[in-house]
Amino acid sequence: MRDGFRVAQDSAVTLVLPELTGDTLELRVRVDYRGENGILPVMKLTLNDTVLGPERAIDRPAQIHTPNHDGYPSLDAFDTRKGAWRVKYDEDFELSPDTGQKYFTQDYDPLFRFRIGDLRRDAGNRLRIDNLETRFRPSDQGVLVLGYVHSE
């Protein structure tokens, strides 16, 4: 996890987590893509067969504002049709307008936090991470990169 756990495009991984002692699950995540600095609904999270959607999210805005984008002033942070969170395309975890004012977002945070108290099991907690990105296949770009997964 130190260098980032990678989930390839159009694929899924299931992490079997040890006993979760906390009521909150945290993930720090980005999409690896060297050109565009946009945000797309690409990350579907399921813990023990339950989708981690907006009703479980902590301090996650419903809308992500893109004040300098000519096509749309904001996007839904969670795409209900795909059941997926929008994740920022960025070369690292620092958010800055350097890559392009078009995709500058003031209210986006790469840290995702969820309430999981009632979903925890004594052992064998399964976190499924789906990367729904398909635009750049086949490529090493468009890969979800998890900086860490933590429960507290």
Image (spheres, rainbow, N blue to C red):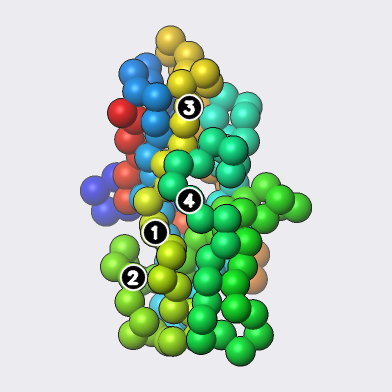
- SS at badge 4: loop
Closest to the observer, 49 or 55: 55
Rendered view: 49 above or below 6: above
Give residue 50's position: percent from left, percent from top. 62, 29
Of pointers 4 and 2, the one earlier in the residue sequence: 4
| Circles 2 and 1 in contact, beta carbons < 8 Å | yes
Residue pointed to by mark 3: 116
Of pointers 1 and 3, the one earlier in the residue sequence: 1
Judged from this view, the residue extending furthest toward the top is 122
Q: Residue at 34% of width from left, 18% of height from top?
A: 21
| Left-right relation of 60 to 151 | right
Rendered view: 7 above or below 139: above
Give residue 63's position: percent from left, percent from top. 57, 62
| Circles 1 and 4 in contact, beta carbons < 8 Å | yes
Residue pointed to by mark 2: 95
Of pointers 1 and 4, the one earlier in the residue sequence: 4
Circle nearer the viewer, 4 or 3: 4
- SS at badge 3: loop
Residue pointed to by mark 1: 109
Q: Residue at 31% of width from left, 63% of height from top?
A: 93
Q: Quarter holding the C terminus? A: top left
Closest to the observer, 98 or 9: 98
Residue pointed to by mark 4: 60
Work out how far the residue at label 2 is from the one at label 1, CA to CA, in angstroms. 8 Å
| Left-right relation of 146 to 67 | left
Closest to the observer, 35 or 67: 67
Note whether residue 26 is visible. yes
> The disc labelled 2 sits on which kind of residue?
Leu
